[in-house]
Image (cartoon, rainbow, N blue to C red):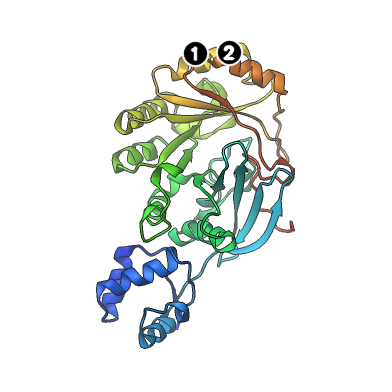
């Protein structure tokens, strides 16, 4: 008999499972807590479940997580994990320490590969394999906590492989488990969904009432240049994306984060900074600037620090909050845009 993986099931689904085997709802809460909060992945270790129930569960079910196939640590402390899924597809997760704040962020994937084909992104060059299941998404923070303990990370960002809003249902279900008091117990405001600009998904997120943060990968101040590096712009032009983002800020009374990657000679001039400030005027936001991280086969160039600083100085105070993000993990291809799911690193 083929067993069913319990990782990724919601509280309601656990209750239905326990009802099917003739158990009361409180048993579902116990099992849910053992897996997600206590990180016990073998039924024999679930001490408050009767032995006969544990044996019955073991006959039909298992708790399967992504497996660490390889890991690599950067000179700046960033750690990258290659995770293998049950069907042998691979994804990557990245653990990023911020010494200035003392916080650690876990960057996780929502898809194996990506269908968007952004020219600056190694994941996009891979093409698209498939969406991740809820269990494969929630399995990433579970694997990292199992390795490093409860305090392994402070924040979770959907900035790894894939476009999270194209796997909306699974991502939001995983977030429900992450934020549950019997689950991973991560505050919603410590979770960020980063999108390339899927307008329909932004609108669904706004309507959902979820308190997670929103980030938009912007990268150009006009449609023409954005289309050259982000083909998604053809389907979702900037006007509609920014209208949806503005509505999100109105409903949630919070700032959106605009991520802007600077490419030498393409979008890093003074006029580009002024155009960007005009584009986002009226939208409560903060802007993160990041110099392009070169990838194999990419044709962009990384601007120098002086150019990045000048762009930031032009942008602020015309934009309300501007930060220069330092690239982390570049030496192990773990920085923004560099995740390619390659096997073979140590």
Residue 45 seen in render: yes
Quadrant of the rendering where the C terminus is positioned: bottom right
Vertical position of residue 10 compared to residue 211: above or below: below
Distance CA(mark 2)–CA(mark 1): 8 Å
Q: Provide the residue designation for mark 1.
A: 318
From this viewpoint, which residue is outermost toward the bottom? Answer: 52
Classed neighbour count for the residue bearing mark 2: other residues with Cα under 10 Å, few (<14), some (14–19), many (≥20): some
- Judged left or right of residue 231, residue 327 is right
Look at the numbered discs 2 and 1 and tell me whether their residues touch, using CB distance below 8 Å: yes
Q: Position of residue 149 (x, y in %)?
A: 55, 60
Front position in the image: 199 or 56: 56
Q: Position of residue 233 (x, y in %)?
A: 49, 30
What label sits on residue 114 in the rendered view?
Answer: none
Vertical position of residue 34 compared to residue 234: above or below: below
Q: Position of residue 288 (x, y in %)?
A: 55, 28
Q: How many marks?
A: 2
Classed neighbour count for the residue bearing mark 1: other residues with Cα under 10 Å, few (<14), some (14–19), many (≥20): some
Quadrant of the rendering where the N terminus is positioned: bottom left
Place residue 236 in its image quadrant.
Answer: top left
Q: Position of residue 111 (x, y in %)?
A: 52, 51
Q: Secondary structure at mark 1?
A: loop
- Judged left or right of residue 70, residue 149 is left
Q: Residue at x 74, y 45 (%)?
A: 75
Q: Provide the residue designation for mark 2.
A: 314
Vertical position of residue 297 compared to residue 285: above or below: below
Place residue 147 in its image quadrant.
Answer: bottom right
Q: Residue at x 54, y 50 (%)?
A: 153
- Judged left or right of residue 206, residue 143 is right
Q: Residue at x 36, y 61 (%)?
A: 182
Q: Residue at x 61, y 49 (%)?
A: 94
- Judged left or right of residue 305, residue 274 is left
Q: Secondary structure at mark 2?
A: helix
């Amino acid at each position: 008999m083929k067993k069913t993986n319990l990782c990724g099931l919601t509280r309601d689904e656990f209750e239905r499972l326990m009802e099917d085997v003739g158990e009361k709802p409180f048993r579902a809460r116990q099992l849910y807590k053992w897996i997600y909060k206590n990180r016990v992945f073998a039924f024999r270790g679930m001490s408050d479940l009767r032995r006969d129930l544990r044996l019955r569960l073991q006959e039909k079910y298992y708790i399967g997580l992504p497996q660490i196939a390889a890991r690599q640590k950067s000179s700046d402390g960033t750690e990258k994990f290659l995770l293998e899924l049950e069907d042998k597809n691979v994804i990557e997760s990245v653990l990023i320490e911020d010494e200035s704040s003392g916080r650690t962020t876990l960057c996780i994937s929502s898809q194996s590969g990506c269908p968007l084909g952004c020219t600056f992104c190694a994941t996009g060059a891979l093409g698209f394999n498939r969406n991740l299941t809820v269990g494969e998404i929630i399995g990433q923070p579970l694997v990292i906590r199992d390795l490093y303990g409860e305090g392994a990370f402070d924040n979770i960002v959907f900035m790894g492989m894939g476009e999270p809003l194209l796997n909306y249902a699974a991502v939001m279900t995983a977030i429900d488990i992450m934020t549950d008091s019997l689950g991973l117990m991560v505050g919603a405001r410590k979770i960020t969904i980063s999108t390339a600009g899927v307008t329909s998904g932004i609108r669904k997120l706004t309507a959902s009432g979820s308190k997670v943060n929103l980030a938009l990968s912007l990268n150009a101040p006009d449609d023409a240049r954005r289309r050259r590096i982000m083909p998604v712009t053809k389907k979702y032009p900037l006007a509609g994306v920014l209208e949806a983002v503005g509505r999100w800020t109105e409903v949630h009374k919070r700032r959106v984060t605009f991520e802007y990657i600077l490419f030498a000679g393409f979008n890093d001039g003074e006029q580009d900074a002024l155009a960007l400030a005009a584009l986002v005027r009226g939208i409560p936001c903060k802007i993160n600037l990041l110099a392009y991280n070169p990838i194999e086969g990419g044709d962009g160039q990384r601007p120098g620090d002086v150019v990045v600083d000048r762009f930031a100085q032009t942008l602020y105070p015309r934009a309300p909050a501007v930060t220069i993000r330092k690239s982390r993990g570049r030496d192990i291809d773990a920085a923004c845009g560099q995740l390619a799911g390659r096997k073979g690193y140590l």
